[in-house]
């Protein structure tokens, strides 16, 4: 019988789902994704977590609970370091332990420890161990891993080309479906696919000139792209006529280039990504304003938020809005603040002309 592996639609899902899905499906398992976040999922998450946990951790618990009874395994990688530079927030490091301790009756967890600082091949070895647990042979696992890495690179290129994760995931699926069935994709074929993803024009770019204001919306991907938690923030901003840029739209090499200019090195991967992407927007003079979406109860955000506020002041007092979201945030309250902010940006832009 085909094993069913559950993936919670939260936290690292937004960065890695196409890669994980490819790997697990190529191993011959069925991937079951938890449904989009709803009030019910958040309520479940609140039930299982301590009250002072940040909202993304509560949401994650809710997504795990939604998979119980549907799957044979749940995938919760222990993400330690992705770039060899910083580590992820401690809550990511202890995520699987937290889940095991707080939710009873969960299926066995698949928890590969992903730490690039252990060597270039360490993540691959961790994934090969997952394949062994799922009963797949070494050769199959190696081919699956190679395909998964290629899909991951393609997905990243689409994000850097201004696609939102939901659009880029569909496009990555389509790309994978177009591969020849009888042989693995050659490296040259994979590279040309990834290069064309980088070069293609997206709807957002095509409409950029007709937008009124250029707005950077920064924050952790699991906050920015969860429509329920953000009360549809990105869609609402687009409907107000803003052209939106997010950290994932800045190519990795540009974010890396900003690392040297960062006055305060932060210990956590996603916090650094937010700061570096923002510096890129500043340097390229790409934005009329900045919105920082911060999670209630997030330790690292306390520092990131203050740094961004001070940095905006240094950028000729660039308008800055800090939007702190939790499980009680209401759509009307968010919309009022967004409308006021965008209105102010439009006026300011007119005055500066
Ligand atoms: S970085 Fe902040 S929001 Fe993200 S998991 Fe850690 S504490 Fe929560």
Image (cartoon, rainbow, N blue to C red):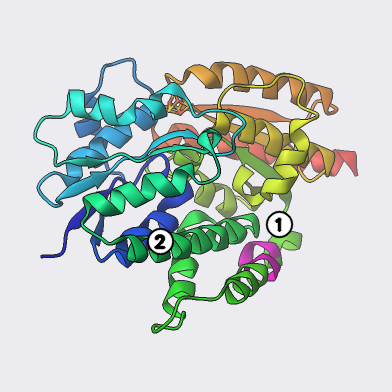
Q: Does the magenta stretch include residue 126?
A: no
Q: Does the residue labelled 1 lie within 8 Å of ligand 1?
A: no
Report the side of 9 relative to 72 (left or right).
right
In which quadrant of the rendered image does the C terminus lie? top right
Query: Is disc 2 placed on a helix, strand or loop?
Result: helix
State yes or no: residue 201 in magenta: yes
Task: Tell me the chief SS of the magenta region.
Answer: helix
Element under disc 1? loop
Quarter, ligand 1 = top left
Instruction: Determine which of the numbered discs, if any, sits on residue 211 in the image.
Output: 1
Q: Nearer the viewer, residue 269 or 297?
A: 269
Mark 2–mark 1 Cα distance, whole angstroms, equals 46 Å
Q: Residue furthest front?
A: 138
Residue 222, above or below 329: below
Give the labeled residue for mark 2: 142
Q: Which of the pair 257/1 is nearer the observer?
A: 1
Q: In which quarter of the image is the N terminus?
A: bottom left
Q: Where is residue 152 in the image (x, y as percent from the top left)?
A: 51, 58
Q: How crowded is mark 2: few (under 14 residues within 10 Å), some or many (20 or more)?
A: some
Q: In this view, does 188 lie above or below 67?
A: below
Horizontal side of 154 relative to 148 (left or right) equals: right
Who's the residue at 61% across and 60% down the image? Answer: 157
Name the image quarter holding residue 260: top right
Q: Position of residue 178 (x, y in %)?
A: 46, 81
Q: Which label belongs to residue 222?
A: none
User: Ligand 1 within 8 A of label 2's CB?
Assistant: no
Q: What stretch is highlighted in magenta?
A: 197-205
Q: Which residue is drawn at 77% across and 20% down?
A: 263
Which callout, 2 or 1, points at the residue further toward the start of the chain? 2
Tell me if residue 150 can be seen.
Answer: yes
Question: Residue 56, how many percent across, how many down?
Answer: 38, 32
């Amino acid at each position: 019988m085909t094993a069913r592996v559950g993936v919670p639609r939260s936290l690292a899902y937004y960065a890695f789902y196409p890669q994980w899905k490819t790997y697990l499906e190529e191993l011959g398992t069925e991937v079951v994704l938890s449904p989009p976040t709803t009030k019910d999922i958040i309520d479940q998450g609140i039930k299982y977590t301590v009250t002072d946990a940040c909202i993304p951790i509560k949401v994650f618990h809710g997504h795990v609970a939604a998979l119980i009874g549907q799957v044979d395994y749940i995938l919760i990688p222990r993400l330690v370091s992705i770039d060899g530079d910083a580590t992820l927030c401690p809550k990511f490091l202890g995520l699987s332990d937290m889940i095991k301790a707080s939710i009873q009756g969960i299926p066995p967890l698949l928890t590969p420890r992903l730490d690039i600082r252990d060597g270039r091949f360490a993540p691959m070895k961790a994934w090969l161990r997952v394949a062994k647990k799922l009963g797949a042979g070494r050769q199959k696992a190696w081919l699956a891993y190679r395909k998964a890495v290629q899909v991951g690179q393609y997905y990243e290129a689409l994000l850097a080309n201004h696609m939102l994760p939901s659009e880029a995931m569909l496009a990555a699926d389509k790309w994978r479906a177009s591969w020849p069935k009888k042989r693995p994709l050659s490296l040259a074929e994979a590279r040309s696919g990834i290069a064309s993803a980088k070069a293609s024009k997206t709807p957002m770019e095509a409409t950029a000139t007709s937008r009124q204001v250029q707005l950077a919306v920064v924050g952790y991907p699991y906050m920015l792209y969860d429509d329920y938690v953000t009360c549809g923030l990105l869609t609402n901003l687009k409907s107000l006529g803003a052209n939106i840029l997010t950290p994932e739209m800045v190519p990795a090499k540009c974010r890396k280039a900003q690392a040297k200019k960062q006055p305060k090195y932060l210990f956590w991967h996603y916090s650094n990504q937010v700061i570096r992407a923002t510096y890129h927007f500043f340097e390229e003079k790409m934005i009329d304003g900045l919105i920082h979406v911060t999670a209630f109860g997030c330790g690292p955000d306390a520092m990131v938020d203050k740094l961004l506020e001070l940095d905006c002041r240094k950028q000729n007092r660039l308008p800055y809005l800090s939007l702190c979201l939790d499980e009680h945030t209401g759509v009307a309250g968010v919309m009022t603040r967004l409308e006021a902010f965008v209105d102010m940006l439009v006026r300011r832009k007119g005055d500066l002309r």
